[in-house]
């Protein structure tokens, strides 16, 4: 399953690679592409008749968790391999996954609930993909670490087998585990959703494992990209939401105060330097932190809307200048807003 947003060219390449698998051709596996309301046109190659491929088109972008849940509920499989669009997969990836699933069924300790596989950078170097569950001390200490290494354990500390959590870029999910925990938490729009899933799975007695013997290339991990004002709002919300849901109340309260202080200081600094978009993002982060602290904040699509509003303010057209000659006053025509209800359309090429 591939959850897509504005990455159709990457999806087309990945689907072409996966479709070469004999398991897809025989019907043993199918490729599900869940699109979160991308504005880009769907590549023609994905609209051509192709055995083993289904496109699920959502009416709105409700986040990664929502996309995974849509694919899970539409799937007939006992296992789901979740892949980011910017994954480069070898032709035998699916066969190797199927062999591991067969081995899982024969293990005395039983099947795992979540398995993360090794990630590599385009240059072949290992890419971090395993972490320990966050707490207040770790979160504060991580601020002293470069962002590219902040969220994950260093390679020398990671061993195959049981781990706290694995990243969602290449993730094998047991369908029985998903049913047990109720799917991924859709209040997380993006970031920390896989951490929350692994936490919930562990609490229900499921194993979370890391298997570096199988690797894929991940082209553009989030930690290697600059954080936009919109993403700052989303990531701060996800961090606070995780603390509110999965950690003691005093840790959530303390982190909320830290984020509020950070937002005020960095917002004031941005305003002083004339960085209006950055200042708006910190103002929105402060709003989100206050609402989460009061228990009134919403997640999912509502958080995306807040983040987009930060960046959209600079795109608003200026008010037209008043004409020099008098005009006859005209009554404005009523504006009409047409909203879309949340839903999914299925295309089978």
Image (cartoon, rainbow, N blue to C red):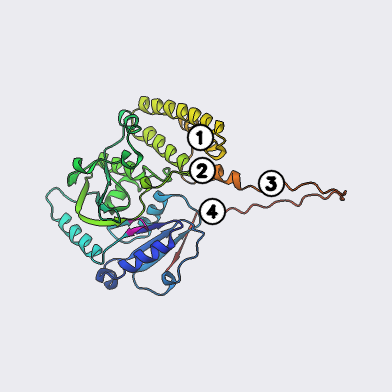
Query: Label 3, on which residue?
Result: 318
Query: Label 2, on which residue?
Result: 307
Q: How many residues crowd around disc 2 within 10 Å: few (fewer than 14), some, or many (20 or more)?
A: many
Q: How many residues crowd around disc 4 within 10 Å: few (fewer than 14), some, or many (20 or more)?
A: few
Tell me the magenta residue range: 83-87
Q: How many residues crowd around disc 3 within 10 Å: few (fewer than 14), some, or many (20 or more)?
A: few
Instruction: Reply yes or no: does residue 84 show up in magenta.
Output: yes
Query: Label 4, on which residue?
Result: 341
Query: Label 1, on which residue?
Result: 282
Task: Report the Cα–Cα distance between label 1 and label 3.
Answer: 24 Å
Which mark is on residue 136?
A: none
Task: Report the Cα–Cα distance between label 1 and label 4.
Answer: 30 Å
Task: Report the Cα–Cα distance between label 3 and label 2.
Answer: 21 Å
Q: Earlier in the sequence, mark 2 or mark 1?
A: 1
Secondary structure state at the residue bearing disc 4: loop
In what quadrant of the picture does the N terminus appear?
bottom left
Secondary structure state at the residue bearing disc 3: loop
Instruction: Measuring from the top left, give residue 133's x and y in whole percent.
Output: 28, 37
């Amino acid at each position: 399953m591939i959850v897509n947003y504005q990455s159709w060219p990457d999806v087309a390449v990945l689907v072409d690679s996966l479709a070469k698998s004999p398991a897809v051709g025989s019907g043993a596996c199918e490729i599900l592409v869940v699109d979160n309301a991308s504005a880009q046109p769907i590549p023609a190659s994905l609209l051509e008749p192709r055995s083993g491929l289904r496109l699920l088109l959502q009416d709105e972008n409700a986040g990664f968790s929502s996309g995974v849940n849509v694919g899970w509920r539409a799937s007939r499989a006992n296992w789901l391999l979740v892949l980011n669009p910017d994954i480069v997969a070898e032709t035998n990836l699916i066969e190797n996954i199927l062999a591991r699933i067969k081995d899982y069924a024969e293990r005395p300790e039983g099947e795992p609930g979540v398995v993360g596989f090794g990630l590599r950078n385009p240059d072949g170097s290992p890419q971090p993909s395993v972490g320990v569950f966050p707490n207040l001390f770790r979160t504060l200490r991580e601020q002293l670490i470069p962002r590219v290494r902040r969220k994950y354990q260093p390679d020398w500390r990671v061993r195959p087998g049981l781990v706290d959590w694995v990243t969602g870029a290449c993730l094998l999910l047991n369908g029985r585990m998903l049913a047990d925990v109720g799917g991924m938490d859709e209040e997380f729009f993006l970031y920390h959703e896989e951490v929350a899933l692994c936490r919930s799975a562990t609490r229900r007695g499921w194993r979370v494992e890391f298997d570096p013997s199988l690797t894929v290339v991940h082209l553009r991990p989030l930690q290697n990209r600059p954080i936009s004002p919109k993403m700052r709002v989303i990531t701060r919300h996800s961090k606070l939401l995780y603390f509110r849901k999965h950690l003691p109340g005093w840790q959530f309260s303390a982190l909320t105060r830290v984020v509020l202080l950070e937002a005020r200081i960095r917002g004031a600094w941005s305003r002083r330097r004339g960085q209006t978009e950055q200042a708006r993002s910190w103002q929105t982060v402060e709003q989100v932190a206050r609402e989460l602290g009061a228990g009134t904040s919403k997640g999912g699509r509502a958080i995306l809307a807040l983040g987009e509003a930060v960046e959209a303010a600079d795109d608003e057209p200026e008010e037209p200048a008043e004409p020099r000659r008098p005009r006859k006053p005209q009554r404005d025509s009523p504006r009409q807003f047409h909203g879309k209800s949340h839903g999914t359309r299925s295309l089978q090429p």
